[in-house]
Image (cartoon, helix red, strand yellow):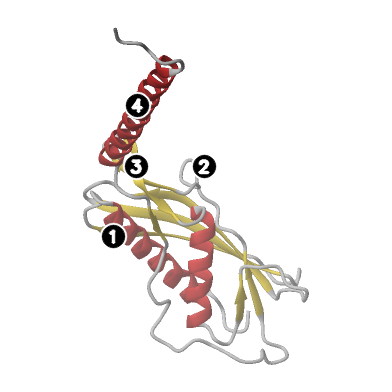
Amino acid sequence: MIRQTPGATGHSLSIRETGMSLRKKSGFAAAALLLSVSLSACAGPALQLYTLGGPATGSAPVQGAVAPGTPILEIRRASLPDYLDTQDIVVRQGTSIQRSANGRWAERLSDGITDFVAARIGAARPDLFVTDQSLSVPATARLAINITRLDIPTSGTATLEASWSLIPVDASKPEQLQRGTVTASGSAAKDADAVTLADTLVSQLSDRIVRSLPQGL
């Protein structure tokens, strides 16, 4: 006759339970790994950030102390239509507005345009101290830029329409208001292409503004 020793059944159950627990943990780990791989496979392209770039001009940057009496030009933040003044890269396809799924401006577009215009004017006019920040000393004049249209179609001609005002701090001097339209041709099927077109348009606008600024303000 076979006798069962006390405690043998409990010991046998403990081994089986341990085996089941290990199998469950292994199953959970495998499922988590499979889910992670599946999510990685479904993930889209990485987010790309863009800026308005390229050298402002070919000249060397201005450095050193600012000479006393140097005119100070303060550039106010550019004004844009609300639907454009975001970090979204926006193009037009027919009458539809398309926002990029994976591309963004590195900063709000009005800030990026203001920074870029200030850099180009500063490089082109070293006789001026150009800034887009408020200073402790009063500015000689302020520049206000109002972009009423920035249209970049997926194909065809991109257009920028703007007006700008040079506002002297000296109330006895008249405000100078000007306007202009610039264009650039090319495809905007890719984000990088749309950024290149925007860069070209803002560069042309900057050049127009530079040519309109009087000497000495």
Answer whether labels 1 and 3 touch (C-beta < 8 Å). Answer: no
Element type at mark 3: strand
Residue 208, by quadrant, is: bottom left
Estimate the spatial distance between the alpha carbons at disc 3 and disc 4, rounded to whole Å.
48 Å
The mark lying in front, picked from 3 and 4, is: 4
Element type at mark 4: helix
The disc at residue 170 is none
Q: Earlier in the sequence, mark 3 or mark 4?
A: 4
The disc at residue 82 is 2
Estimate the spatial distance between the alpha carbons at disc 2 and disc 4, rounded to whole Å.
63 Å
Element type at mark 1: strand
The mark lying in front, picked from 1 and 2, is: 2
Q: Earlier in the sequence, mark 4 or mark 1?
A: 4
Label 1 crowd bin: few (<14), some (14–19), many (20+), radius 10 Å: some
Q: Nearer the viewer, residue 46 or 96?
A: 46
Estimate the spatial distance between the alpha carbons at disc 1 and disc 2, rounded to whole Å.
22 Å
User: Residue under circle 1?
Assistant: 184
Residue placed furthest toward the front = 1
Answer whether labels 4 and 1 touch (C-beta < 8 Å). Answer: no
User: Residue under circle 3?
Assistant: 101
Q: Earlier in the sequence, mark 2 or mark 3?
A: 2
Quadrant (top left/top right/bottom left/bottom right) for the N terminus: top left
Seen in the image, is 17 located left or right of residue 81?
Answer: left
Q: Nearer the viewer, residue 111 or 177?
A: 111
Residue 133, percent across and down?
Answer: 66, 68
Determine if residue 26 is in view: yes
User: Residue under circle 4?
Assistant: 19
- Amino acid type, mark 3: Ala
